[in-house]
Image: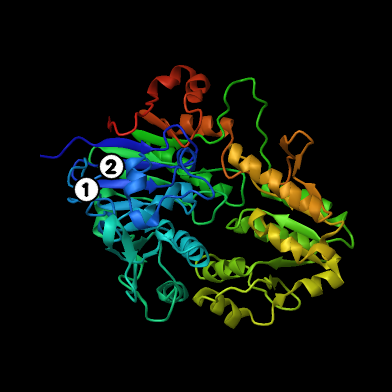
Amino acid sequence: MARPASITVLDGHASVGGTKIAVDTGTATVLLDFGTNYQRQSHFFEEFLHPRPARGLVDLLELGLLPRLRGVYRPDLFPATDYPDRDAGFPGEPPSAVLLSHAHLDHCGALAYVDPSIPVYASPTTLALLRAWQETGQTNVSTEVTYVAPRTPAEGGLLQTERGAPRRHRTYRLLGEPSTGFSAAIARSPVRRGELEGPVPAAGTADPLVRSLGIDAPTVDHSLLGSHGFLLDLDGARIAYTGDVRFHGARGPETEAFLRRLEARSPDVLIVEGTRLRRDDAEPPQGRTSEEEVRSNAEKAVAAEAGRLVIADFGPRNIERLVTFRAVAAATGRQLVVTAKDAYLLQLLSTTEPGIPLDFGVGGMRIWAEPTTRSPGAWSSSVTEAFGGAEIGPEEIERSPGRWIVCFSFFDANDLVDLRRAARGGLWLYSSSEAHGEEQEFDFRRLQHWIDWAGMRARGFSVDGEGTVRFESGYHASGHATEAELVELVRRASARQIIPVHSATPRRYERLLGPEGARLRFPTPGTPIVV
């Protein structure tokens, strides 16, 4: 006998990020996103204190940073000394799939711990973004979101990576038809050719699960390409999930089209984000800076720096912002310099997204030749093969610093040591989000020390003598809808039940919706809400 359909918010109910939602259809369970809750994780861990990879899932489960769920996690990450029966005593039903809204890690980072045989439904662009992040970053269990290195038991309840064992693809089902170029790139070995095994990601839009759940995945506007909302048409229940949305980016019309589909279908349940909900009415009204305004303001700031180096600091996967600064560079007679990781990401994305810039060369974009020696991986060899001759080192930038906009972020700040002569007198233009929490404020103070040491000036943020961090508007377009836009979305969707997630202040919706707030359902983690 089928169970009544229900929704269980496992995490992310009262925080920006960590979204994990289980939808029980009555006959199957699917997960909407499976993200890392960085806010909760910071209660226990920081830069030099991490979950222990050799202990698999132990630290995360025991500290409550991952929910205890049956049939969700990788069998090879349960040490027999701690979990002799693995997850046999955990509650819930094994999920049939994970549906990923987009590639920000607060929505998909905990996928690293999920059983790789569970199908993950995502856009080709989301998979490209995650593959680039995994290949070019640190190699450990917490980054294994697109392929995994199997672990085997060692002494003392520890786990070790199997030497010489091939990495294995996760089971990805793509929300869209992959191109031949994408399929070839994603199937390539991340370490050595022939070492990546398992199911090559394939189109999943017509498979039985999509049909049985009526899964519709409209694209939406967000600060990350490849973002989706979800509509599930179950027997007797229609469920909508916004993911992260905005209306003011280059793809704002796609969010509006998604909203029109919600209006037409009148979902029974709307699971809606609330990132930009204010704490109370005393907070100042929210602005809505568009990407075009960012371009205009950045162009004016760069034009005022004739003869001086400009460093543009923005999110490493915000391709829309990279394209913006490429336009700024062209308008101000400069060339854009990106990192090798950026170049590799653009190379992968060019197989999934139209208009991705790949004009690398002496007259186009250039690739920062990082002076530090690193072991080249397959990804960096791919960049060298594709864009050889586009590299630029500190000496060439130093000869004419006013010709360049260099795309760095906080984590590239130590390369200022090699650019110190070119950087003096130049501008560090911050074009990303404000700090969320005390840890990020510390990062801005550190960054200000780097900028001061290099003799540069900062725009977009400032740190006063007391250490207070302030942000200058106009240089960043938020990835999220404003409070007023969220209220309009909720009202137009006309859902019978509204479940707020991804917000530090979800109860703000009560004040904003007034009498309509009676439809709100504030989740208790782990407790089902019957549809």
Q: Is residue 264 visible?
A: yes
Residue 432 location (% of width, % of height): 66, 48
Task: Name the amino acid, label 1.
Answer: Asp
State the residue at coordinates (72%, 59%).
Answer: 325
Please name whichever residue, 11 or 191, is drawn nearer the observer in this view of the structure.
191
Residue 530 visible: no
Please report contact status of discs 1 and 2: CB closer than 8 Å, yes or no: yes
Q: Which residue is mark 2?
A: 68
Callout 2 secondary element: loop
Neighbours of disc 2 within 10 Å: few (<14), some (14-19), many (20+): some
Residue 56 screen position, x and y as percent:
33, 54
In the foreground, 242 or 374: 374
To which residue does mark 1 refer?
87
| Picture quadrant of residue 113 | bottom left
Q: Residue at x 65, y 67 (%)?
A: 339
Q: Residue at x 46, y 40 (%)?
A: 44
Q: How many marks?
A: 2
Residue 117 location in percent, x, y?
27, 61
Which is more N-terminal, label 2 or label 1?
2
User: Which amino acid lies under the numbered mark 2 shown in the image of this protein?
Assistant: Arg
Q: Residue furthest left?
A: 1
